[in-house]
Image (spheres, coloured by chain):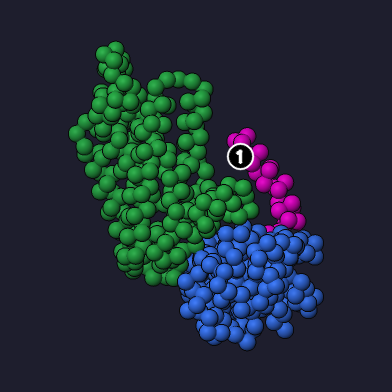
Chain colours: A blue, B green
Amino acid sequence: MVLVASLLGATTLAGPRALAQKKLRVAAAADLQPAMPILAEQYLKATGIKLMVSFGSSSVLATQILEGAPMDIFLGADFTYPEKVVAAGLADGTAPTPYAKGTLVLWARKDSGLLPLSIERLTDPRVKTVAIANELHAPYGRAAADALRKMKMYDAVSPHFVVGENIAQTAQFVESGNAQLGLISLTTASTAHFKEIGEYVLVPTSQYPPILQCAVIMKNSDRKAEAHAFLDWLLTPAVQENWQKLGFAAVK
Amino acid sequence: MDFEALWLTLRLAIATTAILLVVALPLAWWIASGRSVGRALVQAVVALPLVLPPTVLGFYLLIMMGPLTAPGRLLIGIFGHPLAFSFTGLLIGSVLYSLPFAVQPLVAGFGAVDRGYTEAAEGLGVKPWTVFLTVVLPMARISVLTSAVLAFTHTVGEFGVVLMLGGNIPGATRTLSISLYDLVQDGDYAAADRTALLLLVFSLSALLAIYLLPGVRRTEGGQADVAR
């Protein structure tokens, strides 16, 4: 009885504190990995709500959500995977909401011997390894493969592919010097570390369909109002203007 | 079924097992032939892959094999290319990752060999190396078999190290477990089921074969051990 009483006491005491420190569970695509800590800090300052972020490739996150992962909001790296959540009837709303546009870049280390960098470097005879995200289930991988096909380079470059499971691992392959070139996200290429040790060029946006990053809010979440407020915040002009610094393009 | 991945996985497991036996036999014999801090330390280091997350081991290997570290530059000098994303790189990763599975049954088996026989043979003037080959190995043959089967099956089921180090290249680094992971990610559950079933049946049969061997008894830990 004493134990129960003390537990109850503890719960009552923790009550107001738990209210003061609200949490939102976010499933975020791997390309958000560099941007999310910055956003989370800004959001905590603005609202007092702490973002609990789980990263993964969009397809893994979508599968986990379909299997009942406890999430409040899913920030995908494209339209397809959030749409799967909508189709399964798990989303609050009838369509995914675009919140940012992803940008694909070609990146190389400064000590790779491949600078100055240009898209044509992909077919440079010295290049034996090109890191790319899995085109079957990573949105940036699909965009990269589409771009290579449209630029008629796919057949020449694909024998040199080393395939990352998601865009963050793809960046790691080329950052560690194991791959010579990498088709990675501008979000990663824009970080201080990647700017210091490497250079990037944009893959022409005319060569691949836009990487329209979409979000869905979970129907079963008990923090739907907070999740909507967070998504609205992501769409405010102030945050959208800030996207560029983080390597995204605004959707508005 | 991805037969290219199946064939690659078999080649990787065979090569890993062959290398591991060459490395593990003398190592386990040395560990089993006495008690000292040095031996305990080596045994502990050998056992590390059991507790390190495979993805972490794979990440360290990726960095170690890359051009940013001295060992990586040395390896690139020897092989002419970075070892990550190559069969050789996976082979090194697999040998390290499966080392405890090869060494530990051997240490147990060699430890159970009655020293009376080896001392008698040495007393007759037989060289230690010959004693090992003609007395110890035949007496510990079931441990040798256990060690080989465990190293082989463990390599077949390896995932984290391959994921971090491999780069998913068909015919070079896309093993069956990676192919299975891709199938699940793509939502192709029917094909994934077939691959998973093959892995399951294969592993179960291999382990069952060990436990059914005459002379193998099941210890409390469930690990195959040699009867005296």
Q: Which residue is mark 1?
A: A4
The x, y position of residue B50, in whole percent, is 47, 41
Mark 1, residues whose alpha carbon is within 10 Å: few (<14), some, or many (≥20)?
A: few
Residue A24 lies in the magenta-colored region: yes
Q: Position of residue A100 (x, y in %)?
A: 67, 77
Q: Is residue B117 magenta?
A: no
Residue visible at 78% across and 77% down?
A241
Quarter occupied by the C terminus of chain A = bottom right
Q: Residue furthest top?
A: B123
By secondary structure, the bulk of the magenta-drawn segment is best described as helix
Chain ID for label 1? A
**Amino acid found under the numbered disc labelled 1:** Val
Q: What span is in magenta?
A: A1-28
Task: Choose between A76 and B181: the one closer to the eye.
Answer: B181
Left or right: A168, with A89 as reference point: right
Residue B45, percent from left and from top: 51, 34
Q: Is residue A237 above or below residue A226?
A: below
